[in-house]
Image (cartoon, rainbow, N blue to C red):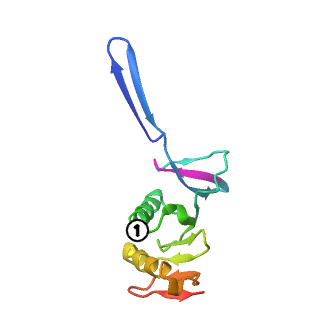
Amino acid sequence: MEQYFIFKRYPSSIEINIKKTKFLAKINENGKIFYLGSNGKLTKNDFSNNQLPFIFGNPDVIEFFNIKKIIDQSKISYEEIKNLYFFSSKRWDFELKDNTIIKLPNENTKLALKLALEFLHNNEFKDNRIIDARIKNQIILND
């Protein structure tokens, strides 16, 4: 549950509105798979959802929401992401469903992602499987 509102209607009724949380990713926590909800909480669930990206590493929930916000503001759809990799240096890589890997720096992430996506969507570079945007104002391509 993400939010709830309770309103007492006098004299004898209560109105309860509940907003369901949306699952955003899967993460391994102490050897168990949990779902990270839009409310920032981890939920153990028995259903299998292979559409959600898997988070590797141990990010704080706030770090995940920061990268999610950057992705949502970019020209890439969050649904295109297969895996998110968090490193102890506080930087992220992510793997798209077409197996392309985008490596991002821990600073100026929004600008680096924008530059990486320009190369990703350029037909001249469509065969490149790794787009490395970790160095400021540079893109390194590997196929």
The residue sitting at 39% across, 23% down in the picture is: 15
Quadrant of residue 95 within the rendered picture: bottom right
Quadrant of residue 31 within the rendered picture: bottom right
Left or right position of 68 against 51: left
Amino acid residing under circle 1: Ser
**Stretch in magenta:** 33-39
Q: Nearer the viewer, residue 124 or 92?
A: 124
Q: Position of residue 114 (x, y in %)?
A: 40, 76
Residue hosting label 1? 74
Query: Quick check: can you spot residue 95?
Result: yes
Relative to 110, say whether 26 is above or below: above
The residue sitting at 42% across, 88% down in the picture is: 138
The answer to whether residue 110 is magenta is: no
Q: Nearer the viewer, residue 77 or 138?
A: 77
Q: Quadrant of the C terminus?
A: bottom right
Identify the main secondary structure in magenta. strand
- Which element is circle 1 on? loop
Q: Position of residue 28 (x, y in %)?
A: 62, 58
